Amino acid sequence: MIHGLTTASAALLDRLSLTIQRHPKRLTAAIAAVLLTGGGGAFAVASFAPDPGELPVRMVSYPVESLADNVVLGELDTPGFSLFRSEQVRSSDTPESLLQRMGVADPAAAAFMRGDGTVRQNVLGRSGRVVSAETTDDHRLVRLTVRWVPDDSGNFRRLIVERTGDKFSTRIETAKMTVNSRLAGGVIQSSLFAATDASNIPDAVAVQVAELFSGNIDFRRSLRKGDRFSVVYETLEADGEPLSSGRVLSAEFVNNGKSHEAVWFQEPGASKGAYYSLKGESLRRAYLASPVEFSRVSSGFAMRIHPILKTWRAHLGTDFAAPTGTTVRTVGDGVVEFAGVQNGYGNVVFVKHRNQHVTVYAHLSRIDVRQGQSIEQGQTIGAVGATGWATGPHLHFEFRVNGQHQDPMTMVAQSEAAAPVSAAARPAFDRLASGMRMQLSAAALIEQASAN
Ligand SMILES: [Zn+2]
């Protein structure tokens, strides 16, 4: 019956542990209950199927015997069992709610945390900070550790609340994060974020993948069920625990049967790196595929028929529905030709690019640039709103060539790519690319194995 216990769920064991500590006499009954409702039950049913009428009797007698041997008790007492937990701070957390979620029942610790300035300043209200707790086996706090990344220095902070006897103390330490890389992959069932959630891939990585392939794949409209991806990305770890994700180092995305690959590479002497195909072609184009960054929020909104003009074609643009305040960026380098208010457009920005190309961004709630200003691809020019003729918040986007409206998607797809990897950097790039090809295959294998 030990087999049954080890397969019982951790949650059940956890609840059980409280009962055991408070009411040792009820231990046998509790264990029996777990075995009846948990994995042990299923195991027993399978083994004794021929005579179901006798099942309950056998179920109770077995665990009681093994308890008498102290075998099960010994297992329950091991430190890994329930004494160490990790969680994230929520914005609404009080010391009590945070401790309770960590499995700590310790009013003295909660009172100390409520009164401690360092804890109030660095833990309470700081949602997303990673917390771990060590407790005694009667759920009193031994040590609470909170870790976070304060800036881009590569360091993290570690706040420790520690018990010594009946007293608590607080201290803050600074330490270096370690950089690691992680291989991961997924298959699209409903959306990119559903797939990355299932594989425990952070949103920041999902967004990078969508952005770096956006010249080739329309992540808002053309993902298919069964599309799959692999990605290698940096993780920044504090005390062995991932605290944040860094850059995507390489990625492969198979969309509708066609494979797209990318690898991050920095030319020697260049001020920054960029993404290239494994053949060395730049993935960067003269225009971004979208003036609104792909995100969990904006991905949920489909582009739509213009609410006032009622038809798709009549209004000669593309609408990106997104909440008011969502950042709007220029799709290409250029000069601000107009920034202000125009009738139906409301707050609007016109950007003039090379070759008599002009892009238009309308209905903005806010404008962040002024007429005559030079701006770079990706730079913020304002925020989504509903000014002018708009029934709801969205960005109305137009692409004009010599004053004529063009389909923005076509213009972006046809826009020229940046320079490929230089001849001088080619040998270094090829070495990197073949290493990345191997890592991406490994990531795909891991994904297949976990799917099977
Ligand atoms: Zn529109």
Image (cartoon, grey):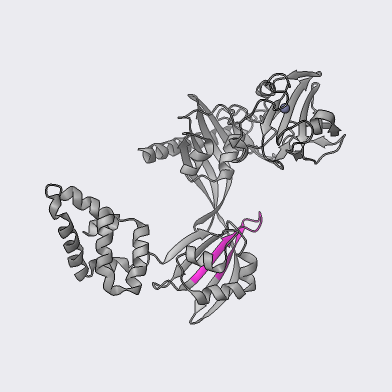
Give the residue displayed 57% in from the left and 72% down from the top. Answer: 113
Residue 81 visible in the current orientation: no
Q: Position of residue 86 (x, y in %)?
A: 48, 60
335 left or right of 205? right
Residue 318 to residue 57: above or below: above
Q: Position of residue 354 (x, y in %)?
A: 79, 24
Front residue (pair 318, 273): 318
Give the residue displayed 85% in from the left and 38% down from the top. Answer: 370
Give the residue displayed 79% in from the left and 33% down from the top. Answer: 388
Majority secondary structure of magenta residues: strand
Residue 257 visible in the current orientation: yes
- Quadrant of image for the N terminus: bottom left
294 left or right of 381? left
**Is residue 149 covered in magenta?**
yes
Residue placed farthest to the bottom in the image?
Answer: 166
Q: Position of residue 54 (x, y in %)?
A: 13, 55
The mark tally for this picture is 0
Residue 313 to residue 118: above or below: above
Front residue (pair 63, 333): 63
Q: What segment is highlighted magenta in the picture?
A: 143-160
Residue 311 to residue 157: above or below: above
